[in-house]
Image (tube, helix red, strand yellow):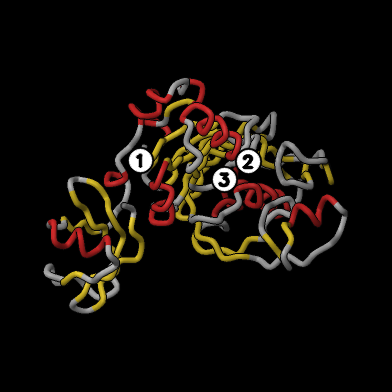
Amino acid sequence: MFGFLNVYKPTGMTSHDVISVLRKISGIKQIGHSGTLDPFAQGVLPIAIGKATRLIEYLNDDKEYLAEISFGKATDTYDCDGRAISECNSEIALNDLQKALKTFEGEIFQTPPIYSAIKVKGKKLYEYARKGQEIEIEPRKVFIERIELKSFDEESQKAQVLIKCSKGTYIRSIAHDLGQNLKVGAHLSELIRTKAGDFTVDKAIFLDEIKTKEDIEKNLINPLKMLNLTQIILNEIEYKKITMGQFIDNKNSLQNDDLIILIYNNEIKAVANVDGNLIKVKKVLV
């Protein structure tokens, strides 16, 4: 079994829980995912099965989310699962919210939540948090391509915000920082990932709809459809060369350092780099 699955992760499960379910159904251990979703979050979770796990790093990694942000309370985890660390009865106005959102557009530095799996000095941040230990967290550069207010309920002080961003962006941090900027506190109360690279929510299959190995097989996506890399079709001689780790000629005059996919019999057999007049294999999948 070889390919990708566009799974809709339900709330209440970790991303690894989803993999465990699929391993049990398929009988295959080699399963991975692209981009963790927190347990309270739901939405698109790209899954790779079999040797397709070795192609995860080549997938487009931009993300899109529909986030519900609740104002008036900040939590230690920056989301609805955390403990309240501040509360405020002041209310924000629509105009102030719209102005504050604009400050998050483009390239920004954000501090990841202390309750996250990022490693600092060999330990995950949440390990420090659970022990009540303080640790300096370096801000990280991320890119917010689009941040758009979809709705705002002034009575409940809840906003729905569409966010399109680069890999590694913490939507929880955006919610927390937005609350800080508006001086009322805020946390992420709901999160739906609507897009991960070229995997979209409208084409995702709900996890509870996958009950048999056949369900997985019929929903498998050919990686060729999801990898936006130049594709080169090999002849038999070239195919034999790459299986032995040998170079092949750059007959197509591809640009130096280009990353390409090598195909034989309509299947991905390797990922390679262009090095002058040669194509050098980086990763063989046969």
Q: In the drawing, does residue 143 fall left or right of residue 274? A: right
Question: What's the distance in space between the residues labelled 1 and 3, CA to CA?
Answer: 21 Å
Label at residue 61? none
Label 3's element? loop
For the residues carrying marks 2 and 1, which lies nearer the camera in this image? 1
x 56%, y 63%: residue:
108
Residue 21, percent from left and from top: 55, 30
Query: Which one is nearer the viewer's eye here, 258 or 48?
Result: 48
| Local crowd size for mark 3, using a 10 Å CA cut-off: few (<14), some (14–19), many (≥20) | few
**Residue at image point 51% right, 21% down:** 208
Q: Please, which residue is most extreme toward the bottom here?
A: 276
Asked whether disc 2 touches disc 3, contact meaning CB atoms under 8 Å apart, the reply is: yes
Checking the image for residue 2, the label placed there is: 1
User: In the image, what residue occupies the spot 84% across and 62% down?
Assistant: 134
Residue at mark 3: 36
Whichever of labels 1 and 3 marks the residue nearer the N terminus, that label is 1
Per the image, the residue denoted by label 2 is: 38
